[in-house]
Image (cartoon, rainbow, N blue to C red):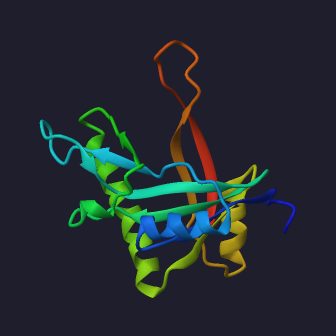
Amino acid sequence: MGRDIDHLHHVGHVVNDMKEGLDLYRRLGFRLSPPAYPMLSPREGEPPRPFGAANTHASFPRNFVELVSCVRDDDPDRIPSDARLVPIQAPPEHLPRLTEAIRRTVAKIASCLARFEGLHILVFKTPDADAVAGRLSSEGIRHGGVSAVLVPAAAALGAAILFRKAEGLKAV
């Protein structure tokens, strides 16, 4: 890889059915944690429900394979029995933007699935994601751009949850 990319951070294996994906990776010999299923209230006052994209990881020393699937409202039986339901909490003024960002991500995953199940996501570790994105664009290499996300970090003060900004460059 070029000098501006440190290493492959992870690849994403997009599957139609998380249960089947888990079964495949477990038969291959991987130990996967229960998949995380984000939950969000569709409207204020309503109970949260699974929403967005579910995922789990097959880990290696410096990177991982992410097993990812779209959450489908029409078939709750597709959620594995050991799934971790993860409520997403955000101030009401941020929910519309957050919901739209999740919907865009799910639309990208769904478009991958419309072509085929498989490895669709490459994420690289780099100290300057914006510069690498610019270089790739100038060289005519399509990519998904720089993703900045909030990632839960270790809670240092009792039950408080701290966040850090994580950046990566996703090739598509």
**Residue at position x 17%, y 40% in the image:** 47
- Which quadrant: the N terminus? bottom right
Residue 105 percent location from the top left of the image: 41, 62
Displayed quadrant of residue 121: bottom right
Say which of 20 and 13 sits in front: 20
**Residue at position x 47%, y 52% in the image:** 35
Could you tell me if residue 17 is visible in this image? yes
Which residue of the protein is positioned furthest toward the right in this rendering? 3
Residue 122 percent location from the top left of the image: 64, 68
Which residue of the protein is positioned furthest toward the left in this rendering? 45
Residue 31 percent location from the top left of the image: 63, 54
Could you tell me if residue 172 is visible in this image? no
Q: Is residue 47 left or right of residue 145?
A: left
Which residue of the protein is positioned furthest toward the bottom in this rendering? 115
Q: Is residue 138 left or right of residue 104?
A: right
Q: Is residue 82 left or right of residue 27?
A: left
Q: Is residue 73 left or right of residue 151?
A: left
**Residue at position x 47%, y 18% in the image:** 160
Say which of 88 and 94 sits in front: 88
Displayed quadrant of residue 8: bottom right
Does residue 120 sit above or below 162 in this rendering? below
Residue 48 percent location from the top left of the image: 23, 42
- Which quadrant: the C terminus? bottom right
